[in-house]
Image (tube, helix red, strand yellow):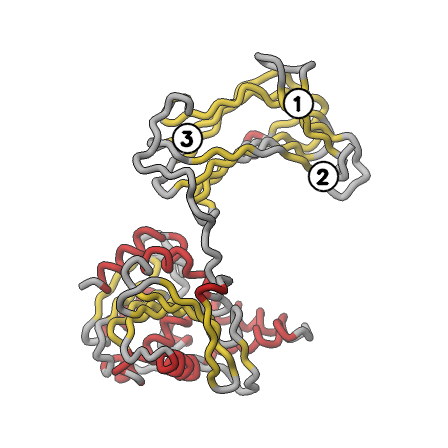
Amino acid sequence: MTKSGYKVEIDSTQKYTGKYSLLIENIAQDVESNYAMSSLIIPAKFDGKEVEIRFYLKLEHVTGHADFPFRIDDEDNDKLQFTNLLAKRIYGTQDWQLYSLKLPLQKEASKIYLFPLLYGPGKMWVDDIQVLIDGVDISQAKIKTGYNPNTPEPINYGNNTAASGRVKVKDAELYYETYGTGDPLLLLHGNSQSISAFKKQIKAFSKKYKVIAVDTRGQGKSTDSSTDPLSYDLYAEDMKILLDSLHINKTNILGWSDGGNTGLIMAAKYPKYVDKLAITGACTNPNDAVSTSTLEEVRKAIESLKTKLDAKSKYQVKLFTMLLTEPHLTALDLKKIKAPVLVMAGEKDMILEKHTKFIAANIPKSQLFIFKGASHYVPVEKVSEFNTEVLTFLNQ
């Protein structure tokens, strides 16, 4: 008996073909865990467009459900694709039955995960698992050109001591990480985020640029001891001090949401520091940029946080309050920006499209790009497309 109340083992008494099957059985119900699973990890080293898994299941007195989650991750261990059997709701008692699940195989795929799983009481047997690439068994499938089995462990962006540094600013200390060589590129994340939000961008952009990714004050690993309200002007001043400390007198900037707001202020207030600016989901005034319902949601979140006494919740109130009160950029401020600016947003962004177009229309050297089907989280939803647009702009 395991601590989970389940046993997972090879069984020679029940099998579809061959000598053995995999058995997952609930043997005690008076424990905290109410499920158990096994796992199989396969390198996604195959050249193809689709992965299919076929397998046979046998059930006995399953009152919860049997499942077989199937996931494909990239080299950063981030999920690319996922599917399972929940739509079929498999339970009860049944003899061996064939099932199939399919997922597209993206070029970024690194690992294929299979998780036979039993939820609740009963017994579940799994046998004859087959993995096919475009209909061909993996034993015969074509291997990707240039496949390297010794792929290094992914970098823990935002928690990488080897690339880190700190700089003191007014009533705060900023944590940053630096990657690559070339012209500098400063990455500015959004509200309540950190460096790790840009991990898909750091990897791509550091191949050509010296990327400086920073945790805004009070977020990530950066500190903040100030008692005054937060503002994007303060953030912009922080970034100026950071750049001065690194002896960078001119940089490209990529800003997402709050980071975009900060980038706009830097371009208007400290024009000599900004070479090119790319922003996504930025705004000039919250009352014009988002719907009244979005503002109301933020107000409700603030009221809920005010009932908590921990330091993190108190700081979160400051962060969310800034969303209601900042920034205060006018069309005249935007017209003063001399740097080329790429203005981006998702088609379904919380920032109203008319506001994104207003920003682009008032910046003299601007380009506008709206990502179809994307939300405020374009950099993680449309990684390849987003990175391509930003790099094309920076390389012009």
Whether residue 320 appears in this view of the structure is no
- What's the residue at 34%, 40% (across, down)? 107
Q: CA distance from mark 3 to mark 1?
A: 26 Å
**Pointer 2: what residue?**
34
Q: Nearer the viewer, residue 307 or 214?
A: 214
> Which quarter shows the C terminus?
bottom left
Q: Amino acid at mark 3?
A: Val
Above or below 86: residue 216: below
For the residue labelled by badge 1, is the local secondary structure a helix, a strand or a loop? strand
Question: x%, y% of residue 101?
Answer: 47, 29
Q: Amino acid at mark 1?
A: Ile
Label whose residue precedes the other's in the sequence (3 or 1): 1
Q: Using residue 345 as the reference point, say whether residue 23 is left or right of it.
A: right
Name the disc covering residue 151, or none.
none
**Pointer 3: what residue?**
51
Question: x%, y% of residue 337?
Answer: 24, 80
Question: x%, y% of residue 98?
Answer: 53, 19
Label whose residue precedes the other's in the sequence (3 or 2): 2
Q: Amino acid at mark 2?
A: Asn
- What's the residue at 42%, 22% (across, down)? 139
